[in-house]
Amino acid sequence: MKEKNIKKKSGTDWEKLSKMEDNDIDYSDSPELNESFFENATIRMPEPKKAVNIRLDNDVLEWYKKQGTGYQTRMNAVLRMYMMTKKEVGNKIIIKTNKKEKSK
């Protein structure tokens, strides 16, 4: 995964933006959505999450909990990104145990 340079200064004038009124916003490049836009729209509900029992190191769990509400959602997002990265690269996951290495 490519690392982003978060030290780069933003070109946004945040002070000017915070003082801007809604009617000062230029919407010319994003037309208003009308009824025709929604004629073929469908509602897609997310798949329900599956409740599982998982063993985590205490310090890992506590760190996520300290991040506040939604820590389980964030943990899921991290796991999903890891999964997607492995799928893209096609790497095997190697699990090292005290006994021997297993390839999954």
Image (cartoon, helix red, strand yellow):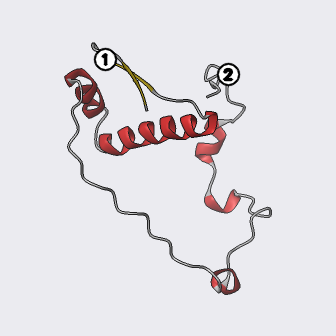
Question: What's the residue type where badge 1 is placed?
Answer: Thr
Few, some or many C-alpha atoms within 10 Å of disc 1 (few <14, some 14-19, many ≥20)?
Answer: few
**Position above or below: 76 against 99:** below
Question: Residue 31 appears at what percent x and percent y?
Answer: 75, 70
Q: How many marks?
A: 2
Which of 93 and 80 lies nearest the eye of the viewer? 93
Please name the residue shown 58% across and 44% down the image. 18
Few, some or many C-alpha atoms within 10 Å of disc 2 (few <14, some 14-19, many ≥20)?
Answer: few
**Quarter of the N terminus within the rendering:** top right
Q: Quadrant of residue 28?
A: bottom right
Please name the residue shown 64% across and 26% down the image. 4
Residue that carries the numbered disc 2 in the rendered image: 8
Question: Residue 48 appears at what percent x and percent y?
Answer: 35, 62
**Quarter of the C terminus within the rendering:** top left
Question: Residue 27 appears at what percent x and percent y?
Answer: 74, 63
Which of 27 and 16 lies nearest the eye of the viewer? 27
Residue that carries the numbered disc 1 in the rendered image: 97
Left or right position of 92 against 68: right
For mark 2, give the secondary structure. loop
Please name the residue shown 24% across and 53% down the image. 51
Question: What's the residue type where badge 2 is placed?
Answer: Lys
Q: Quick one: label 2 or label 1, which is nearer the N terminus?
A: 2
For mark 1, give the secondary structure. loop
**Position above or below: 27 against 77:** below
